[in-house]
Image: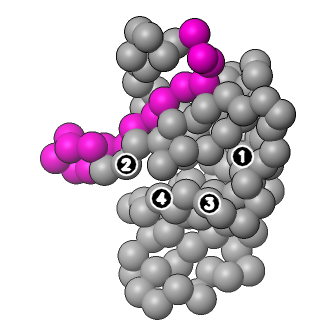
Amino acid sequence: MQVACPRGGEDEARRFYAEALGMTEVDKPADLVARGGCWFRAYDDTGSVAAELHVGVEDPFAPARKAHPAFVVDDLAAVAGRLRTLGYEVDESQRDSFPGHVRLHAFDGHGNRVEVLQPV
């Protein structure tokens, strides 16, 4: 998965994807570091990679307002709480609209739409 950020937007990406969503930042390959951006992973209970997200620098930048990554979590309430604590708006208006899951939508600090789901 990939989302974009403006040049210099890596710290805001870290705040949202690592601090709020709980993903782990991983090193980019050395030959890609100069391009900017940052990469994140989420791991399952066995330590296997469950998701990887690449935040790439785009110039000119335009946020993805409709297209979005979706992350499945074990504790939606905890994620919603971290998002709110960090000042992100949490939209739960479609909470029960996806069979077998509860969900929320948020926008990262650059305006990219993100979905977070929990199986029920």
Counting the numbered discs, the total is 4
Question: Residue at the location (48% across, 49% down)?
Answer: 1
Name the amino acid type tagged 3. His
Q: Mark 4 = which residue?
A: 71
Measured in 3D between alpha carbons, the distance from the residue under mark 1 to the one under mark 4, in whole angstroms, is 13 Å
Measured in 3D between alpha carbons, the distance from the residue under mark 2 to the one under mark 4, in whole angstroms, is 8 Å
Residue 26's place in the image compared with 21, above or below, is: above
Verify CB contact (< 8 Å) between mark 1 and mark 3: no
Observer-side mark, 1 or 3, equals: 3
Mark 4 neighbour class, 10 Å CA radius: few under 14, some 14 to 19, many 20 or more: some
Q: What element carries label 1?
A: loop
Q: Mark 1 = which residue?
A: 108
Marker disc for residue 77 = none
Mark 2 neighbour class, 10 Å CA radius: few under 14, some 14 to 19, many 20 or more: some
Chain-order first, disc 1 or disc 2 = 2
Q: Mark 2 = which residue?
A: 51
Q: Quadrant of residue 56?
A: top right
Query: As drawn, is 52 to the left or to the right of 95?
Result: left
Question: Residue at the location (72% across, 66% down)?
Answer: 66
